[in-house]
Image (cartoon, rainbow, N blue to C red):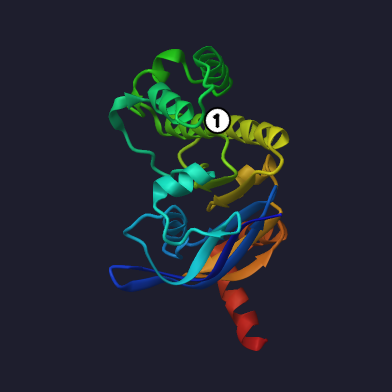
């Protein structure tokens, strides 16, 4: 079943077009990866998908669960089941992870059970190596880069989104933490097979654990090539510059 469809999307920031005529379809259960050089438009796409008002959609549309969400705000998109694990999660003073999740989950149902929530929260935190004290501290206060990324994964585990967007979840994370995050995501997909993942990354290390169904190369706000994991190996071997130059040359010759 189709989960997300992006149709001829154009996004501008301060009247400058960053994303130009981009289309992408993601079905339930699929893992899609977008790779590209810095400045290629990856973060702009992520922000547009989450409804960040700074990133204005000037053309095309975004459909989620067969509903046009182009005009929806971030909160509405999140309630529908879109979750973004941020590249640089901020510190939020005065609000703990436990409070954030409790308030969010209790607002969804009349049958919220605090004991079950606490048990799931603590079990999930332990699996990620997050101690109990961190759950009740201001969000990301004093957290290392790796701990912030783990905290993002903790939240998605409890919120159970339908579409997970991972914006460079592998940056600033050591090998052990990367493997741990991948294992949690693999288990999450086994328990929630309809959930899809859209991952933005520069690196191939993560794919040792979580292999994508589709890989897309982005350049100048466009998806210039889509394929399988072989594209990842091509980038690893040649680097982004040479890979993109070869792709653009092939497009001209075609």
Determine whether the residue tagged by mark 1 lies in a helix, strand or loop. Answer: helix
Q: Which residue is mark 1?
A: 177
Query: What residue occupies the far top of the structure in this picture?
Result: 115
Query: What residue occupies the far bottom of the structure in this picture?
Result: 253
Can residue 25 be spotted in the picture? Answer: yes
Whether 83 is drawn above or below 141: the answer is below
Task: Tell me which residue sits at (46%, 16%) in the image.
Answer: 131
Q: Is residue 25 found left or right of 155 in the rendered image?
A: right
Task: Tell me which residue sits at (59%, 21%) in the image.
Answer: 127
Q: Is residue 170 found left or right of 104 in the rendered image?
A: right
Q: Nearer the viewer, residue 100 or 39?
A: 100
Q: Residue 170, percent across and down?
A: 52, 42
Whether 96 is drawn above or below 234: the answer is above
Q: Is residue 108 found left or right of 211 in the rendered image?
A: left
Q: Residue 102, percent across and down?
A: 44, 24
Q: Residue 125, percent across and down?
A: 52, 21
Task: Tell me which residue sits at (41%, 45%) in the image.
Answer: 75
The image quadrant that residue 89 belongs to is top left
Mark 1: give few (<14), some (14-19) or many (20+) Cα within 10 Å: some
Task: Tell me which residue sits at (42%, 20%) in the image.
Answer: 135
In which quadrant of the rendered image does the N terminus lie? bottom right
Can residue 174 be spotted in the picture? Answer: no
């Amino acid at each position: 079943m189709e989960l997300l469809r992006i149709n001829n999307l154009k996004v501008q920031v301060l009247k400058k077009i960053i994303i130009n005529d981009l289309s992408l379809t993601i079905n339930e259960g699929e893992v899609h990866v977008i790779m590209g050089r810095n400045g290629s438009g990856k973060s702009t796409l992520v922000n547009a998908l989450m409804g960040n008002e700074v990133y204005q959609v000037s053309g095309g549309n975004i459909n989620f669960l067969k509903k046009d969400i182009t005009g929806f705000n971030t909160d509405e998109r999140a309630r529908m089941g879109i979750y973004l694990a941020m590249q640089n999660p901020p510190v939020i003073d005065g609000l703990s992870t436990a409070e954030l999740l409790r308030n969010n989950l209790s607002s969804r149902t009349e049958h919220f059970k605090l004991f079950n929530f606490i048990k799931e929260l603590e079990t999930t935190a332990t699996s990620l190596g997050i101690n109990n004290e961190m759950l009740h501290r201001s969000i990301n206060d004093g957290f290392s880069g790796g701990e912030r990324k783990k905290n993002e994964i903790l939240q998605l585990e409890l919120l159970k989104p339908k579409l997970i967007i991972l914006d460079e979840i592998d940056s600033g994370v050591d090998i052990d933490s990367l493997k741990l995050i991948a294992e949690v995501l693999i288990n999450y997909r086994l328990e929630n097979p309809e959930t899809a993942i859209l991952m933005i990354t520069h690196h191939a290390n993560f794919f040792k654990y979580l292999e994508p169904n589709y890989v897309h190369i982005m350049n100048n706000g466009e998806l210039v090539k889509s394929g399988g994991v072989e594209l990842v190996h091509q980038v690893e071997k040649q680097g982004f510059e040479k890979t993109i130059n070869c792709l653009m040359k092939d497009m001209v010759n075609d």
